[in-house]
Image (tube, coloured by chain):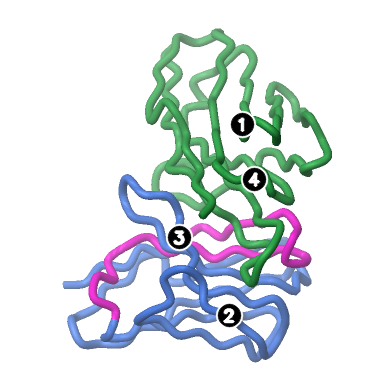
Amino acid sequence: DGGITQSPKYLFRKEGQNVTLSCEQNLNHDAMYWYRQDPGQGLRLIYYSQIVNDFQKGDIAEGYSVSREKKESFPLTVTSAQKNPTAFYLCASSIASMNEQFFGPGTRLTVL
Amino acid sequence: KQEVTQIPAALSVPEGENLVLNCSFTDSAIYNLQWFRQDPGKGLTSLLLIQSSQREQTSGRLNASLDKSSGRSTLYIAASQPGDSATYLCAVRRNYGGSQGNLIFGKGTKLSVKP
């Protein structure tokens, strides 16, 4: 079954903790992306990676970090420096950076 | 700075009606435009992708048009069904600059189709 998986579906974090959201794809896509979605707002780009071992900041990268050690995987770490991390996080991938993007099911992060 | 606007924010129609969702963007220098559907609490499902050189794309009951010069796209849904109820998102892909290829999203139109 080809697609994008994200885990966990729900995540709860205490203030001051770092948490890592998983994103895996078996579509053989080069490009991967992380977005954040808040109620009443459009999706906003956090980080993107066009190829393994390379990634770039998006529009709202502060308080987040990523790695791209494998083509299939693009984990996102939400650090304690992120002031308002409660949101719905979506991972996406595409064959190349200018092509159609496909999305995973999302992770809902709540800070307690 | 590219901005994407979707009007209306919410739309309620009776089953069977044909309807049009609107998307406008401020910078016509786009590479392509993508329409998505999002069900509550779920990820995005890609519906249609229109390249900047194309005028329209069709998939089943869906037809998307693009007028790049006026900065507008429409998504036409024929013979709407209750299962079409969802939020529809429009996104444009930049054609220049360091963030070339990244999508800029509108806030979406929440569609409700009543039986």
Q: Which residue is mark 2?
A: A56
Q: Colour of chain A?
A: blue
Residue type at the position of mark 4: Ser
Q: Are marks 1 and 3 on the same chain?
A: no
State the residue at coordinates (72%, 54%). Answer: A100
Q: CA distance from mark 4 to mark 2?
A: 24 Å
Mark 4 packing: few (<14 Cα in 10 Å), some, or many (20+)?
some
Q: Residues within 10 Å of mark 2 (few under 14, many from 20)?
A: some
For the stretch drawn in magenta, the main secondary structure is: loop
Chain that the image shows in green = B
Q: Which mark is residue A44?
A: 3
Q: Are marks 3 and 4 on the same chain?
A: no
- In 3D space, how far apart are the residues under numbered discs 1 and 3 (Cα atoms)? 21 Å
Q: List the residue tagged with mark 4.
A: B46
Mark 3 and mark 4: span between their CA atoms? 17 Å
Secondary structure, mark 1, is: strand
